[in-house]
Image: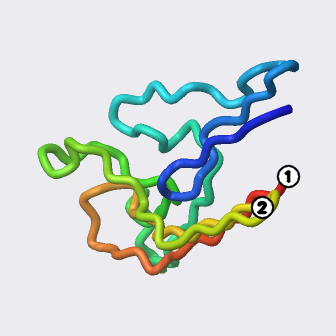
Amino acid sequence: SWSIRIGTGGSMYSHFVEHGHGETMPKQDQARSPFMDEVQQTVAVINAGAYASPACYIHQAGTYQRDAPKTNVPFFSPSLAKHCDGHSCVFASWGQQAHLPTRWTSPIIYITKYTK
């Protein structure tokens, strides 16, 4: 048997196989980006034309904490909807700009479905 754990933004952060190899995803150990880089998540890039910057990246999990004091508390991508039925769960979340501050806003809603 196995289990998964899903973060606020609908990203999977744990996959555990009880009588097998154990945890398949590393534990989060990033002080400035809890549940950001060591999760399975979707990332989008805003088409900014000639403007190329990390500020164009929209993460499913949330934002980095590099803009103190505004980001001292982790900000995860808000969950807009979730529904589980039988062996499937679907999540909708509002993707956030990973790098703050930025002049860009996020127009991205991620839909993620997990099925046994």
User: In the picture, residue 42 is in which quadrant?
Assistant: bottom right
Q: Residue at x 16, y 44 (%)?
A: 68
Amino acid type indicated by mark 2: Ser
Q: Residue furthest left?
A: 69
Sort mark 1 into few (<14), some (14-19) or many (20+) by Cα contacts within 10 Å. few
Amino acid type indicated by mark 1: Lys
47 in relation to 37, above or below = below
Name the secondary structure under disc 1. Answer: loop
Residue that numbered label 1 is attached to: 116
Q: Residue at x 28, y 65 (%)?
A: 102
Of 25 and 97, the residue lying toward us? 25
Of 5 and 38, the residue lying toward us? 5
Name the secondary structure under disc 2. Answer: strand
Is 46 situated left or right of 88 in this image? left
> Residue 93, how many percent across, how many down?
51, 68
Tally of numbered tags: 2
Sort mark 2 into few (<14), some (14-19) or many (20+) by Cα contacts within 10 Å. few
> Residue 57, how many percent across, how many down?
48, 62
In primary-sequence order, the first of circles 2 and 1 is 2
Of 74 and 86, the residue lying toward us? 86
Which numbered dot is residue 24?
A: none
Is 107 situated left or right of 92 in this image? left
Q: Residue at x 46, y 25 (%)?
A: 29
**Tag 2 near tag 1, CB within 8 Å:** yes
Residue that numbered label 2 is attached to: 88
User: In the picture, residue 103 is in which quadrant?
Assistant: bottom left
Q: CA distance from mark 2 to mark 1?
A: 6 Å
> Residue 69, how many percent across, how many down?
12, 45
53 in relation to 30, above or below = below
